[in-house]
Image: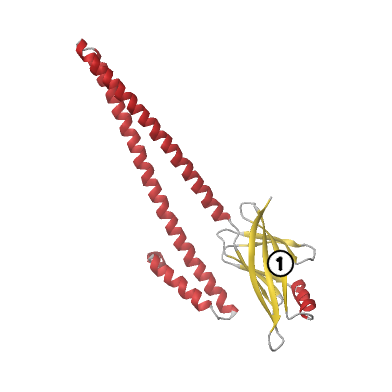
């Protein structure tokens, strides 16, 4: 897909492209699967961006309408005041009419106060929505896998911002800090030695047909928030005696 085709693609076309990439990744080899998953993620991010843009435009139009209504009520209120002062100089029989106008002005002021209260509630809701969007933007989201053939752990950044890896922990073994902080931009991967994982599987699979290892990554988002990503590696031997490992990210938790 060229840049012009991507820019002019509809949501249906982007969804179809993402589905084709996900379906193509099923059963594919690792060198083929990763680019397909990353491209599918790219299409999904674009769909989310367009959806959020529509919501922002809708909220902006609603805010303009509310501001216009408030302005209209202010104009009406000023017109009522001007009319009241004008009629105050007329005959005494108009005094009752002036009192009625003042009463209506009070009602208008109360309505204006109600509108301002509603506008404040709308602003608070918008602030909450913006905060939720910021949390979504800076949220750490990764795919973690273990490749027995390479004896390596792979970390794919599926979030929207750059994250950094600071330490890892294999099951009950001590935490292993990274000598140098590793930065992982969005949509890219980083892999490192998984010798501890391989060693634990070697010890445990000698006695059991399957073994489960807990694995943790200590990471930091681009906003400085620290996270711990908890994973599970389930290992077993196939008929040829080769190690097979299934990986699953269990949780991503903020740290104080």
- The part of the image, by quadrant, that contains residue 141 is bottom right
Tag count in the figure? 1
Instruction: Kindly tell me whether residue 110 is visible in this rendering.
Output: yes
- Say left or right for 233 vs 72: right
Q: Residue 32, relative to residue 10: is it above or below?
A: below
- The part of the image, by quadrant, that contains residue 27 is bottom right
Q: Secondary structure at mark 1?
A: strand
Residue 35 vs residue 109, the one in the foreground: 109
Indicate the colouring scheme.
secondary structure
Q: Residue 4, relative to residue 128: is it above or below?
A: below
Give the residue at x 80% y 77%.
203
The percent coordinates of residue 78 (x first, y second) are: 30, 25
Residue 249 vs residue 5, the one in the foreground: 249
Quarter containing the N terminus: bottom left
The percent coordinates of residue 5 (x first, y second) are: 39, 69
Give the residue at x 23% y 18%.
97
- Say left or right for 88 vs 41: left
The outermost residue toward the bottom is 240
Q: Residue 101, relative to residue 27: is it above or below?
A: above
- Say left or right for 97 vs 198: left
Residue 50 vs residue 213, the one in the foreground: 213
The percent coordinates of residue 252 (x first, y second) are: 63, 59
Label 1: how many Cα within 10 Å (few below 14, some 14–19, many 20+): many
Give the residue at x 46% y 58%.
49
| Residue named by callout 1 | 215
- Say left or right for 167 vs 65: right
The percent coordinates of residue 81 (x first, y second) are: 29, 21
Instruction: Kindly tell me whether residue 2 is visible in this rendering.
Output: no
């Amino acid at each position: 897909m060229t840049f012009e085709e991507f820019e002019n693609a509809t949501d249906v076309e982007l969804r179809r492209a993402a589905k084709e990439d996900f379906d193509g990744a099923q059963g594919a080899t690792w060198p083929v699967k990763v680019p397909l998953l990353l491209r599918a993620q790219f299409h999904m991010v674009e769909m989310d961006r367009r959806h959020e843009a529509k919501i922002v435009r809708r909220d902006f139009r609603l805010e303009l309408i509310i501001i216009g209504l408030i302005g209209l009520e202010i104009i009406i209120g000023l017109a009522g005041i001007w009319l009241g002062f004008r009629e105050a100089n007329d005959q005494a029989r108009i005094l009752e009419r002036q009192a009625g106008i003042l009463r209506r002005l009070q009602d208008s002021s109360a309505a204006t106060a109600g509108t301002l209260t509603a506008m404040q509630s709308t602003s608070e809701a918008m602030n909450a929505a913006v905060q939720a969007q910021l949390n979504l933007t800076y949220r750490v989201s990764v795919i973690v896998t273990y490749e027995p053939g390479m004896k390596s752990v792979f970390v794919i950044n599926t979030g929207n911002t750059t994250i950094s890896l600071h330490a890892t922990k294999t099951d009950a073994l001590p935490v292993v800090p990274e000598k140098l902080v590793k930065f992982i931009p969005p949509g890219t991967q980083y892999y490192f030695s998984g010798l501890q994982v391989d060693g634990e599987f070697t010890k445990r699979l000698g006695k059991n047909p399957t073994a489960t290892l807990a694995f943790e990554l200590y990471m930091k988002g681009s906003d400085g928030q620290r996270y711990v990503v908890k994973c599970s590696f389930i290992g077993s031997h196939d008929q040829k005696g080769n190690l097979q490992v299934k990986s699953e990210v269990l949780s991503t938790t903020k740290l104080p």
